[in-house]
Every structure is written in structure tokens, then in C-alpha cells.
């Protein structure tokens, strides 16, 4: 994550890095999904695939909101970053639970999926903080 590489970022710069990184990540997914569909002989319209992949862009909104709270002076830089990480882990928990239920798991199984997803996301955050 580029944000951990420097200590001299302003809130607008951090927001720009988050937005740019998420757009590149989204474009990579759109491109990969389009290629995969074409390889499978399916219609792979870029526009339709891009729309299907918009949840990747939407996933950055909570972190962006945390950075905006820093920008307007409600949070400190450190608090904004940790809030962004916490919101990201919360998203993983919600997505894991939803995915578990949609794939036919029991509530307990879906909770297990959510906890695994959240733990993996939390582990990534901890490793990044230590590096």
C-alpha cells in the first residue's frame, strides 16, 4: 500500500492515492474478466463487464470517507487510517457472510466464512502496519 511508504502525505494526497489505486485495481479486474469470458467463448463487452465490477470501486467508499474525516479535521491522520482499515475488515465480514449464505451455507457456516475473510483482511492490515 502506497500510504505506508511515506509519512508526509496530506489528506487530499492520501485520498488521491486511494482513488487511483482502486481504479487501477478495478480496471485490472475488468480486463481479466473480459479476457476470461472471451477465452471461454462468451460475449465479453467491456462496458457490461465494467458495470458488473463496480462493487470493487464501491468498496473504497468507506475508506475514502474516513480520509475525508481527516481532511476536514474531525479525525487525526492515524485515526483516519485505522478507521479505514477497520471499515475494510467490517466490509470483508459482511461480504463473507453474504457470500456464505448465497452459496448455501448455514448461518453458522456463513459466520465461519465471514470470520475467515475478516481474519485474513485483519492479518494483512497488521502485517502492513509492522512493515
Image (tube, rainbow, N blue to C red):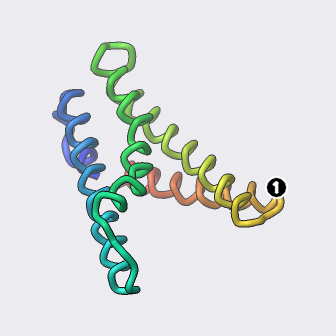
Provide residue 76's location: percent of width, then percent of height: 35, 21
Q: Quadrant of the C terminus?
A: bottom left
Q: Nearer the viewer, residue 26 or 10?
A: 26
Query: Left or right: where does residue 107 sit relative to residue 23?
Result: right
Q: Disc 1 on helix, strand or loop? A: helix
Residue pictured at 18% horizontal, 33% vertical: 13
Closer to the camera, 31 or 94? 31
Q: Residue furthest top?
A: 73
Which residue in the protein does label 1 denote? 107
Question: 10 Å neighbourhood of mark 1: few (<14), some, or many (≥20)?
Answer: few
In the displayed structure, 127 sits above or below 35; it is above
Foreground pick, 129 / 52: 52
Q: Residue at 63% across / 56% down in the picture?
A: 96
Which residue corresponds to the image point at 59% horizontal and 51% vertical from the top-left? 95
Q: Position of residue 127 (x, y in %)?
A: 43, 57
Location of residue 77 with respect to 53 vertically, above or below: above
Q: State left or right for residue 107 relative to residue 37.
A: right
User: Would you say 16 lies left or right of 95 here?
Assistant: left
Would you identify the image quadrant in which residue 53 lies? bottom left
Q: Position of residue 122 (x, y in %)?
A: 53, 52
Q: Residue 71 placed where, x, y %?
A: 28, 20
Q: Is residue 57 above or below residue 10?
A: below
Amino acid at each position: 500500500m502506497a500510504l505506508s511508504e511515506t509519512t508526509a502525505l496530506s489528506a487530499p494526497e492520501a485520498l488521491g492515492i486511494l482513488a487511483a489505486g482502486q481504479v487501477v485495481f478495478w480496471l485490472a479486474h475488468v480486463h481479466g474478466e473480459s479476457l476470461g469470458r472471451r477465452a471461454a467463448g462468451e460475449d465479453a463487452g467491456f462496458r457490461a463487464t465494467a458495470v458488473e465490477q463496480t462493487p470493487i470501486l464501491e468498496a473504497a467508499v468507506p475508506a475514502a470517507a474516513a480520509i475525508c474525516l481527516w481532511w476536514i479535521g474531525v479525525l487525526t491522520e492515524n485515526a483516519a487510517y485505522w478507521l479505514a482499515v477497520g471499515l475494510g475488515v467490517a466490509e470483508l465480514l459482511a461480504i463473507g457472510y453474504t457470500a456464505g449464505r448465497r452459496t448455501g451455507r448455514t448461518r453458522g457456516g456463513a459466520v465461519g466464512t465471514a470470520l475467515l475473510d475478516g481474519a485474513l483482511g485483519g492479518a494483512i492490515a497488521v502485517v502492513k502496519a509492522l512493515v
